[in-house]
Image (spheres, helix red, strand yellow):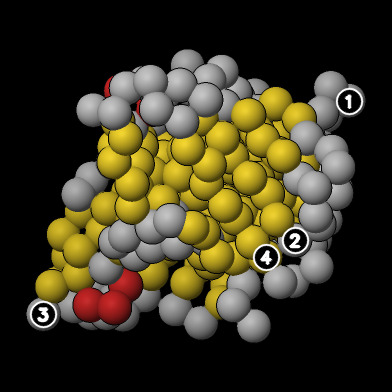
Amino acid sequence: QKEVEQDPGPLSVPEGAIVSLNCTYSNSAFQYFMWYRQYSRKGPELLMYTYSSGNKEDGRFTAQVDKSSKYISLFIRDSQPSDSATYLCARYILTGGGNKLTFGTGTQLKVEL
Amino acid sequence: NAGVTQTPKFRVLKTGQSMTLLCAQDMNHEYMYWYRQDPGMGLRLIHYSVGEGTTAKGEVPDGYNVSRLKKQNFLLGLESAAPSQTSVYFCASSARDYNEQFFGPGTRLTVL
């Protein structure tokens, strides 16, 4: 089982829709989670990060972590064509054996007019 | 303030050829990383550096070497390229190992 799993999509939604992007993770450790956005033929850029549990909101974006089900989500409200990109979830683990950042494979999102 | 830059943007190699990818950052970051990104595999860490003069292996280091002679530069070398090394290579940097990583625009490498 991969440490972080993500549905690759593609996911296509109409402009203005609420988008839900999800990842599952294995293992439990002291950790925090990040969402990166990657436009086509560009490098990833950090969108949001959140610690082990709860929600974090930033404008139209909300990151949520559900520890009981090992599920992390990114919600995008009032989606725009400019949100069309690949979204990568990532998990950072602090362990005695060395810290580790693991990325999901990414979900491709297309917001259509 | 350019952030993280990568040279070259594209390259085509024949099997067995060698090349060096250059990464430069102007944010005075201590940590630098080299990743490869392949369809269905996500970003995988090749090598990283926690400071000038240091390097360490990541998840997929075989076939690659790195050097960090100057704090702002991190070089990735392929001594004898193989078709399996066809990928998009990203360099990243961060102030600390748990801080936000800033990525470069990537280098698309094809090995024939």
Residue bearing the label numbered 4: B25
In this view, the mark in front (4 or 1): 4
Quadrant the C terminus of chain A occupies: bottom left
Q: Tell me how far mark 3 sits from mark 4, CA to CA.
A: 37 Å
How many residues crowd mark 4 within 10 Å: few (<14), some (14–19), many (20+)? many
Q: Residue at x 84, y 22 (%)?
A: A97
Q: Are marks 2 and 4 on the same chain?
A: yes
Badge 3 amino acid: Leu
Pick the residue in front: A78 or A41: A41
Rendered location of residue A57, percent (x, y): 57, 72
User: Which label's residue is closer to the chain start, 2 or 4?
Assistant: 4
User: Which label's residue is closer to the chain start, 3 or 1?
Assistant: 1
Pick the residue in front: B103 or A81: B103
Is residue A103 something one can see in this rendering? no
Q: Residue at x 60, y 55 (%)?
A: B23
Chain ID of residue with mark 4: B
Badge 1 amino acid: Gly
Residue bearing the label numbered 2: B72
Q: Tell me how far mark 2 sits from mark 1, CA to CA.
A: 29 Å
Give the secondary structure at mark 2.
loop
In this view, the mark in front (2 or 1): 2
Q: Are marks 2 and 4 in contact (CB under 8 Å)?
A: yes
Badge 4 amino acid: Gln
Give the secondary structure at mark 1.
loop
Q: Are marks 3 and 1 on the same chain?
A: yes
Chain ID of residue with mark 1: A
Residue bearing the label numbered 3: A113
Q: Tell me how far mark 4 sits from mark 1, CA to CA.
A: 29 Å
Give the secondary structure at mark 3.
loop
